[in-house]
Image (cartoon, helix red, strand yellow):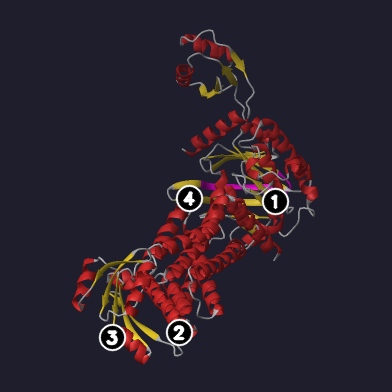
């Protein structure tokens, strides 16, 4: 045990003395989450919309004014028929069309509820989601003002329709995706590199001749990274929650459990790569191609898997981050429990067992 | 008592035969030197002794333990200092030592008496990063790290390479002190002059053990007359010398040419006549005593001629 602690202490010294490692460990996650976050946020500004006002009454004018004076939207055109909606979306001149139902003010006054249709061009799902939620927020604020003078609460029911990508496949993807990316990077790449570094500097020779068992060497190497990865996961969640209002609807315990499972998986992957590379450069390339690119491209983080060719889709099923992202999305956004994500959890566990076995077989108690 | 027994060991990396049919014994409590140029296979042999590599053929036993079967036991009592001093450059001197102490399940305090002669020189630099040490200091630190768990066997792979002359001298003195305390020390070096500092040596070249004995015996095996000449056109002279059948061997030796003739009958006078007959006059011919480099060349030549 003392040997193990000594080893862990040494690893921490390595980490904290190397400014580059520190940047990758702590700067990168924060930078990534902010970059991904703000790229999406920036799109809400002067978004061009079209309005189809079938009612043309004081209430619809008020709402239109509120929307246009908010700074988020700019009116491109008043539409006069349903047909025009389709045409104007096709030209790409507007990203959202707002349709007020017939006799809007009348219905609101009489029945206490009125309908409004929000049609958004969801071919860019993230911004579509953002645009619609902004529109809804503005309408809700207006409604609150209106309700102040009424005894009975009035309701405006926005009927949202996402055109071209109805269920918003990658909305709010960036936080789970970044989390998967950062954890893969920190856990797998960093451990892989630190193990290979010992081979390269020749210190592995001395470690192997010592009475330490391979398990102790590996455990000593990865423990600091498990801790740091957990810290990173928490930082990402906090940033997502407070800066980007990402909801965490499911159980925190489940979320952490799954995160630790994924961290272990990434670590085992890193260890496996380290047994296959002799130099840090090889390890870097290996990690970049085996870990980074697939995490970015084949996990559904950036590109929806459903739109890929069949062959690539199969490849996606072999990517650990895909399952982790699915789990994160379900637990965080939909608030599901283990009952809904047990399949993914099982796949990740299976992968973990596989990688650990391969590494155990491949990790030599001697030099090659 | 025999501490290491190497028995018909072969090791190849693909096509390259790094070690071929190596056999020798290292007596207990002995400072044993493995002498040979770079690429002779010294490191490979040491890695097999320290259980890091498995021989393709043959076997090695260390204090009675087989290096393949009982490798864990051997690792408990072996101190190994690899050729590239296995230090962590981003750890300080003190941190390096305490790390190695911890992984061997001991503490610096407990075995301080062992490393004291060396470590006392390093103590002023306790908080300096290992990467900022000079070659000599790195060597001392690496030795401390290999010694910290009080090993029975100390294996040092080219510990004096890249280290200044003064540090080298101090280093050999330290090794003798350690040997006197009961350790068996196996050390490799490409410097022929360091052979004299060992109790026993083995000469290694191209993966083979050419000869092994005490340094004195190795020197006394050189029985033919040896001369040293200085010539202007060294390569031309060398070619002429090699065409004379009575000259057993002629080779460049620093700025000089060393010439070994086949018997006492062909001495300095005879050599002078031979040279002037071939148009080389006014050379100073000095009889010299063979040193380890001459002996090494001799051993290599003898080994090759006996084999073919």
Nearer mark to the viewer, of 3 and 2: 2
Along the viewing direction, whichever of B99 and B78 lies nearer the viewer: B99
Q: Which residue is mark 1?
A: B95
Per the model, the C-alpha gap separating discs 1 and 3 is 81 Å
Where residue A215 sits in the image (x, y, percent)?
Answer: 59, 65
Q: Which residue is mark 3?
A: A103
| Res. A53 image quadrant | bottom left
Per the model, the C-alpha gap separating discs 1 and 4 is 37 Å
Disc 4: which chain?
A: B
| Res. A329 image quadrant | bottom left
- At mark 4, the secondary structure is strand
Look at the image and tell me whether residue B53 can be seen: no
The dominant secondary structure in magenta is strand
Q: Residue at x 74, y 47 (%)?
A: B29
Q: Give a yes or no on whether discs 1 and 3 share a subunit.
A: no
Along the viewing direction, whichever of B276 and B123 lies nearer the viewer: B123
Along the viewing direction, whichever of A351 and A137 lies nearer the viewer: A137
Q: Which residue is mark 4?
A: B12
Q: Earlier in the sequence, mark 3 or mark 2?
A: 3
Q: Do residues under tags 4 and 2 come within 8 Å of each other at their CB atoms?
A: no
B110 versus B163 height, above or below: below
Q: Mark 3 Cα within 10 Å, few/some/many (few <14, many 20+)?
A: some
Per the model, the C-alpha gap separating discs 1 and 2 is 74 Å
Q: Give a yes or no on whether discs 3 and 4 share a subunit.
A: no
Q: Which residue is mark 2?
A: A149
- At mark 3, the secondary structure is loop
Tell me if A230 is positioned left or right of A141 in this view: right
Look at the image and tell me whether residue A10 can be seen: yes
Q: Which residues are magenta?
A: B19-30
Q: Do residues under tags 3 and 2 come within 8 Å of each other at their CB atoms?
A: no
């Amino acid at each position: 045990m003392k040997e193990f602690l000594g080893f862990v202490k040494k690893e921490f010294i390595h980490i904290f003395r190397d400014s580059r490692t520190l940047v990758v460990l702590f700067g990168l996650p924060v930078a990534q989450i902010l970059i991904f976050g703000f790229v999406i946020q920036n799109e809400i500004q002067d978004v061009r919309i079209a309005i189809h006002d079938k009612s043309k009454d004081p209430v619809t004018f008020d709402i239109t004014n509120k929307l246009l004076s908010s700074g988020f939207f700019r009116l491109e055109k008043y539409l006069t028929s349903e047909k025009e909606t389709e045409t104007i979306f096709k030209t790409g001149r507007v990203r959202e069309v707002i349709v007020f139902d017939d006799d809007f003010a009348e219905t609101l006054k009489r029945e206490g509820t009125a309908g409004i249709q929000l049609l958004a061009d969801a071919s860019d799902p993230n911004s579509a989601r953002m645009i619609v939620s902004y529109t809804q927020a503005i309408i809700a604020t207006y409604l609150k003002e209106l309700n102040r003078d009424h005894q009975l609460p009035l309701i405006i029911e926005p009927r949202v329709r996402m055109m071209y990508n109805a269920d918003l496949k990658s909305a709010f993807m960036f936080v789970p995706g970044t989390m998967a990316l950062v954890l893969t990077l920190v856990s797998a790449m960093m451990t892989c590199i630190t193990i290979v570094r010992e081979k390269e500097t020749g210190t592995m020779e001395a470690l192997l001749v010592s009475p330490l068992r391979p398990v102790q060497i590996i455990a000593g190497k990865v423990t600091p990274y498990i801790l740091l990865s957990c810290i990173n996961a928490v930082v990402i969640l906090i940033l997502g929650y407070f800066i980007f209002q990402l909801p965490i609807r499911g159980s925190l315990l489940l979320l952490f459990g799954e995160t630790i499972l994924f961290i272990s998986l990434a670590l085992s992957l890193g260890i496996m790569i380290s047994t296959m590379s002799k130099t840090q450069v090889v390890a870097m390339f290996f990690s970049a191609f085996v870990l980074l690119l697939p995490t970015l491209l084949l996990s559904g983080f950036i590109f929806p898997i459903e739109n890929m060719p069949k062959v690539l889709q199969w490849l996606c099923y072999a990517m650990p981050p895909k399952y982790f992202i699915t789990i994160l999305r379900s637990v965080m956004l939909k608030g599901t429990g283990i009952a809904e994500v047990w399949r993914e959890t099982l796949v990740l566990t299976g992968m973990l067992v596989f990688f650990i076995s391969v590494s155990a077989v491949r990790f030599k108690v001697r030099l090659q | 008592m025999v501490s290491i027994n190497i028995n018909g060991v072969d090791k190849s990396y693909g096509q390259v035969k790094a070690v071929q049919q190596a056999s020798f014994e290292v007596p207990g409590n002995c400072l044993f030197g493995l002498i040979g140029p770079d690429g002779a296979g010294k490191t490979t042999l040491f890695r097999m002794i320290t259980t890091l590599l498995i021989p393709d053929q043959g076997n090695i036993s260390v204090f009675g333990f087989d290096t393949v079967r009982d490798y864990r036991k051997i690792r408990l009592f072996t101190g190994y200092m690899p050729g590239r001093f296995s230090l962590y450059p981003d750890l300080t001197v003190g941190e390096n030592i305490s790390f190695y102490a911890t992984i061997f399940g001991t503490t610096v305090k407990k075995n301080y008496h062992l490393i004291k002669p060396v470590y006392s020189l390093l103590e002023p630099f306790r908080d300096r990063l290992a990467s900022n040490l000079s070659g000599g200091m790195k060597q001392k630190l690496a030795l401390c790290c290999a010694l910290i768990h009080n090993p029975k066997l100390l294996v040092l792979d080219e510990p004096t390479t890249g280290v200044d002359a003064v540090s080298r001298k101090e280093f050999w003195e330290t090794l003798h002190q350690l040997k006197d305390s009961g350790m068996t020390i196996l050390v490799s070096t490409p410097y022929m002059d360091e052979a004299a500092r060992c109790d026993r040596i083995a000469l290694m070249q191209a993966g083979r053990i050419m000869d092994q004995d005490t340094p004195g015996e190795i020197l006394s095996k050189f029985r033919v007359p040896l001369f040293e000449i200085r010539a202007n056109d060294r390569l031309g002279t060398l070619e002429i010398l090699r065409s004379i059948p009575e000259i057993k061997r002629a080779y460049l030796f620093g700025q000089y040419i060393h010439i070994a003739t086949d018997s006492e009958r062909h001495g300095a006078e005879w050599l002078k006549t031979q040279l002037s007959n071939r148009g080389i006059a006014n050379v100073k011919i000095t009889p010299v005593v063979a040193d380890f480099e001459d002996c090494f060349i001799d051993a290599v030549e003898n080994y090759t001629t006996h084999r073919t």
